[in-house]
Amino acid sequence: MIISNKIAMDTIRKIGRTINAPEQRVIIGVSALLTQPVIDLTNPRADKDTKVLSASRSLGKIIAGTTSGYCVRQFCTSELSRLVQKDNVLDPTKIKERLTKIIKQMQKDNVNPKKIESYQKVLAKMTDTLDKVHLENFKKNLGSIAAIGVMLFTNFLWDAPVTKTLTNKFYNYATGKKAENANSSN
């Protein structure tokens, strides 16, 4: 689908600039929390006990996943943003200085002139200021990428055990009995 309406495109851009990865995770979690248990409980091909267990498991997964997803994304985004800001990693003046040193070293090392020329073009196009919107987007995206790496571990260290615990608690609450097969694969 191609969106050509200017108002729609401006709205989408504004939302994209204002809603960050942690907030996106909360939106996805809330919508899942409102829909998935209903889908599980109204499944016509499952018996009542299976429906309740499935809804309990969905609730546990959604709560554990949304909580850890939000916390990890928020932590990574804010910490990487702080580190980038603290060390002035994206200061255009410092970038120009480093690029100039690289070009001089390349010239000393007799590197291919076309490669040196491409670096010189980049240096010539650089401005002394970076667009604040692009800088903020870069920091947030860097944080999101780091969060993906961290979540590879939190899925096993946090999500799986918490999902199991929550599933059992929700099932016990809903049925008044212990979940026998809630401990099977999450």
Image (spheres, rainbow, N blue to C red):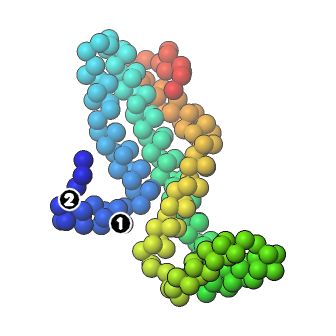
Measured as percent of width and height from the top left, residue 48 is found at 31, 14
Measured as percent of width and height from the top left, residue 13 is found at 31, 64
Q: CA distance from mark 2 to mark 1?
A: 21 Å
Q: Secondary structure at mark 2?
A: loop
In this picture, is 49 found above or below 158?
above
Mark 2, residues whose alpha carbon is within 10 Å: few (<14), some, or many (≥20)? few
In this picture, is 78 found above or below 155?
below
Mark 1, residues whose alpha carbon is within 10 Å: few (<14), some, or many (≥20)? few
In this picture, is 145 found above or below 137?
above
Q: How many marks?
A: 2
* Badge 2 vs badge 1, beta-carbon distance below 8 Å: no
Measured as percent of width and height from the top left, residue 77 is found at 53, 62
- Is residue 7 in view from this perspective? yes
Residue type highlighted by circle 1: Thr
Query: Mark 2 vs mark 1: which is more N-terminal?
Result: 2
Residue at the (45%, 45%) spot, across then down:
66
Q: Nearer the viewer, residue 96 or 87?
A: 96
**Disc ID at residue 18:** 1
Residue at the (35%, 66%) spot, across then down:
18
Residue type highlighted by circle 2: Ser
Measured as percent of width and height from the top left, residue 185 is found at 53, 22
**Disc ID at residue 4:** 2
Q: Quadrant of residue 90?
A: bottom right
Residue at the (42%, 74%) spot, across then down:
133
In this picture, is 100 found above or below 109?
below
Q: Nearer the viewer, residue 1 or 76?
A: 1
